[in-house]
Image (tube, rainbow, N blue to C red):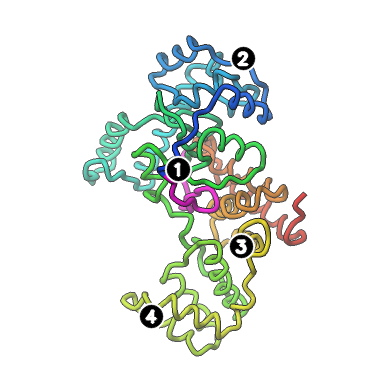
Amino acid sequence: MITPHPSSPRHPSPPPPPPASPASPPARLTPEDARVLLRLLPAEIGPGLTEAELDAVEARFGFGFSTDHRVFLAAGLPLGSRNWPDWRDGDPDDLAGRLARPVEGLLFDVEHNGFWHPDWSPRPTDASEALKVARAASANVPPLVPVYAHRCLPGAPGTWGHPVLSVHQTDVILYGNDLADYIRYEFTDRASSLTAHATVDFWSYLVEGGAGTDVTAPTPYAPYALTPQEAVECLRMLAVERLVGRRPSPEQLVEAGLTALLLDVETESLPLLAGLTRSEHERAEGLFERVLGELGLVGTLPADDSGLPWEAARWELVRWWLRLIVNGSLDPGAGGDLITYEGWGALARPRALRPLFEATEAHNGWAAVRAGSRERLAAAIVAEAERLLAGPWPPPRD
């Protein structure tokens, strides 16, 4: 049975990308560039596709490769893993399924998770009619062409420099400035600093916050504190989140303050924070700052004093998220996403976090959705979180 994608933060690559500069057009990928990239891949590399073969693939499946994608495949064809589409000898039904998967995932979320794109007509109240309208509208969605697993490039012939997108249903994120940046990011353990926006309007809406929860949103956890010490820890970790660019909502600040107040944490400003009404939420940030000062927490926040941006803060957040996963306060898929994109990627892919990253990738993969195996894969994320917490912290980098 297919199960809906859990409510989890959308995972744009860490840290959240600044806007691209329109004055710096993307560079074209040359055949020599492509050969250099192919040498980075842990894959068998077959002969590149000829112009005639590329034309035949496009004609058979009804799409066009972007210029960079075409140059890459002409330089060599990655093989030896089902993650790489075999455009020369692959099963046609499998290739057609890969091409259809982004829209299939979109329609799945329309049917099961209430998704509706603003470019479509008003959503019909009848679920079956809504799916029918969405299916018709999706027939005109610009295609996404698989590069590796669920990483895709827009099918935009004659253009180049498109960001690579990672696609899980309507959870769509930037995974590289362009094809070259993506290859280095995915396969060389080199953190990428994204500066691009999605270049295709329909999918841009999903990348830029149209579905799911933005990565900069508060950690989606259920309040768990049972002691004054745990309540203070929650307040402190919300402050640590702010260091890396994640902004707690006024609702979360008030809720954390109320939890602390009910557990007998005492500061002058805490009752004021906990008692804010919705119309007074603009005061939450200032009162939260006062509570931090009154609790002596400001001086305990980690400094940004290493080569990686906010390295110590990110390790603290990873440990906190692992604890929330283990104690059931944070959905394993959502927590794994957070750690993958705010920890694993931003910390230059430390080897210690690779098993958790791989467990999260398996949990989020389309195969898991189709097979209904998310519960078992979520348990694997929890088990890996427990293993990490039982070891030294932060874990050794090698």
Between the residue at mark 3 and the residue at mark 4, the CA separation in whole angstroms equals: 27 Å
Residue at the disc numbered 2: 47
Between the residue at mark 3 and the residue at mark 2, the CA separation in whole angstroms equals: 45 Å
Is residue 137 placed above or below 348 in the rendered structure? above
Quick check: marks 1 and 4 in contact, CB under 8 Å? no
Report the magenta residues as a range.
Answer: 1-21
Between the residue at mark 2 and the residue at mark 1, the CA separation in whole angstroms equals: 31 Å
SS of the residue under disc 3: helix
SS of the residue under disc 4: loop
Q: Check the image and name the residue furthest to the bottom.
A: 268
SS of the residue under disc 1: strand
Residue at the disc numbered 4: 276
Mark 3 or 2: in front is: 2
**Residue 255 on image: x %, y %:** 46, 74
Quick check: marks 3 and 4 in contact, CB under 8 Å? no
Question: Dot 4 surroundings within 10 Å: few (below 14), some, or many (20 or more)?
Answer: many
**Residue 373 on image: x %, y %:** 56, 41
Which residue occupies 60% across, 60% down? Answer: 321
Between the residue at mark 4 and the residue at mark 2, the CA separation in whole angstroms equals: 66 Å
Is residue 384 placed above or below 76 in the rendered structure? below
User: Type of residue at label 2?
Assistant: Pro
SS of the residue under disc 2: loop
Q: Is 235 in front, or is 365?
A: 235
User: Type of residue at label 3?
Assistant: Leu
Residue at the disc numbered 1: 172
Characterize the magenta stretch by its predominant secondary structure. Answer: loop
Q: Check the image and name the residue furthest to the front.
A: 23
Residue at the disc numbered 3: 317
Question: Dot 2 surroundings within 10 Å: few (below 14), some, or many (20 or more)?
Answer: few
Which residue occupies 69% across, 57% down? Answer: 386
Residue 42 among magenta residues: no
